[in-house]
Amino acid sequence: NFGTIVQVVPHKEEEDMEEHTEIHAEEHEDSTEHAVNVQPLPLPLPVSTTPVSVYNSYDDCFHCSPYADCWERRCICREGFSGDGYYCASNCALDEVWENGKCVRLSYEEPDIEPRCNFFGDCNCDDGYELMEDIQMCRWIGQYNGESKHEDLVPCDVEFNCHHNATCEWYELELRHMCTCKSGYYGDGYSCAIIDESCAVKPEICDPQAECNYNEALGRSECQCKRGYEGDGFRCALAPECLEDLDCGLNAYCDNDICQCAKGYERDMSDMCVLVGSCGAVFCGANAICKFDHVQNVKYCDCMDGYEGDAAVGCKSKPVPCNVQYNCGVHASCEPTEDPAYYECQCHAGFNGDGYTCIEDQNCLNTPQLCDMNAQCLSTNQGLVCVCNKGFYGNGSLCMERKQHDSGFLLVSQGVVIVRVPLNGKNVRPISVASMAIGLDKDCVEGRIYWGDISAKKIVSAKYDGSDVKTFIGEDIESPEGIAIDAISRRIYWTDSVKDTVEVASLEDPNLRAVLINKNLVNPRGIAIDPYREKLYWSDWNRESPKIEMSDLDGTGRELLLGNDSVTLPNSLVVLERSGELCFADAGTKKVECIDPYSKQIRTISNELTYPFGLVYTQDQFYWTDWTTKKLESVDIFGNRQKGLQIPFFGSHKMYAMTSVEDTCSQMDSPCQSNNGGCSDNRLCLVNRKAPSGKSCKCTAQSKLCTVPNPFNAL
């Protein structure tokens, strides 16, 4: 229904009038949904006997449709339109017009024009027209005389004699200035006729900020810029908002044709200047308005219709799709999007930008200064990267010289003494004393050894020769039974069998430390890291439910690797660099075994042992300390047992963990290797390739913007 005539009863109360207005508004909303398909007959004229004095307080004529007339304070659709007077829809199609009581198809021919006549009565028509002598008018014939007048007339740069829809331009082939019709017109420049392409047939010829409307004066449809824009309809630009302050309304003033809100005010969703904060804490950018989300009960900025972009910064007019009008920049191409019907400009590989402006990506090949002077630019699976030269370590942008250290020996803990054991078993000598050292590992970059002292409750370090002994961490340590060094990322990991935790700290700053695991642990002991595959492993010596677990280097992605059906008393752990296998010494099963963390396949290295504890792998041989034989036992890579090394005891008669010192040290880089990976707020950088940046910044006790949970909280 397009409307219902509501008969007005004399002397109706004001409440009835308001109810009439609300009902009428609801009917108007319903009518707009069917205005295209339904064409009801025009409403009959109202009965003149209806009193009109009751409308003195409310005049419906203010709300009449542009295609309606007001008759005795009633809105009546004009002839050729149907509706309730408030909304009137044309009875004709887009390419038709109402004439003489019916719809007539539009004619796109040029109208007749008057000829040009001289004093003697000789008349001529413009090109494209012919003279009709009987009525002395020029009729459009659809073509024009192609013979050029340029040679017969004075050049337009000497005397401007071009048509008002033409410009004077230089033509190199003619070696002279010539008149040329403007865009949208055709002719010889002295006579230019409009190219008749109706937007009713081709709506795409209009600017995105224009509408196709029927012009009764011209008798055809034309492109007209929307409100707030100006131009010829084919090209529309923002029109000046104001000429004076009064044009801008309250709390605003006119500045260079643009309305600006007064200080302390901003625009809201109604384009009014209101107090700052009316759209939350965000100022909406250009071509954006403030909206209200009724679901989340918040205000937000959003681009206006026909615009896209960041509403808080500013919205740009949506460009014409590049498959309609190719407008991509250099180093870009027009590619389909997820919606096959829509295309957009995309920069080529190696360039970045919005598709209209593409800038070459910066890399170490086109920008060599990205690399350290002791590094080179290499092509890898991750693209072009800077790699430190041999003898240096770092991330390629910063390379530091690697110090040369002694190698080819084992460092073994005998509890109260740290012993240096050459691989031939000769010239064994103590290098340092301890209260009770259990776990230890070496830093091949700095040439230092780190051990955990469970009696002194601290972690200590010294050089390979035992000199320069330092307490590395002396607070909040109870029983550090396992130590593992990540020389690449400059991190130290340890297990604490009293706190039942797995923890980590920076080798550069021990105050940057964090607890990674503090749940579901009973007696954590052995620990090992795989810096190449970025995995962390630890054993739990829980007699009721022993296990070996693994996680990422930041403690995330924790999972069970081996349970009590595979291990009994797992002690030390070691990772094989080439295969990535995790090998472990089990004093319960009396075996040394290895497991592939991905396939979960287990292979036995050696069995029928007595009581293995510490375990290392070097020069294609496994070495382990045995509490029963009190020797350093070994087996080669083929499983052949070697003669045990009987070394002198300088402390207790037990050997615990040990590490091997080799002549190689990893050349890899790490996101956390330099400057703590860029982590701020005293957070600790830990490698995690699953994160977008390849790292995570872990909260520490020194952080101010986050709190560290108590590791002794209930599990």
Image (cartoon, rainbow, N blue to C red):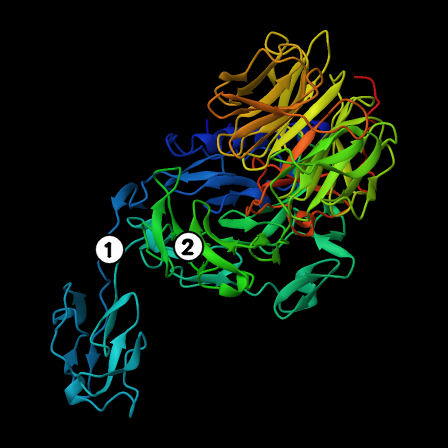
- For the question of whether residue 212 can be seen, the reply is no
Q: Residue 494, image x and y in percent?
A: 74, 31
Q: Residue 398, image x and y in percent?
A: 60, 57
Marks 2/1: CA distance? 51 Å
Q: Residue 184, image x and y in percent?
A: 29, 65
Between marks 2 and 1 in the image, the one whose residue lies nearer the viewer: 2
Closest to the observer: 306 or 78? Answer: 306
Count the marks. Answer: 2
Q: Residue 379, image x and y in percent?
A: 42, 52
Q: Amino acid at mark 1?
A: Tyr
Residue at 20% x, 81% y is 117
Q: How many residues crowd around disc 1 within 10 Å: few (fewer than 14), some, or many (20 or more)?
A: few
Q: Which mark is residue 108?
A: 1
Q: Which mark is residue 350?
A: 2
- For the question of whether residue 594 can be seen, the reply is yes
> In the displayed structure, does residue 453 sit left or right of residue 693?
right
> In the displayed structure, does residue 361 sit left or right of residue 528?
left
> In the displayed structure, does residue 382 sit left or right of residue 550?
left
Q: How many residues crowd around disc 2 within 10 Å: few (fewer than 14), some, or many (20 or more)?
A: few
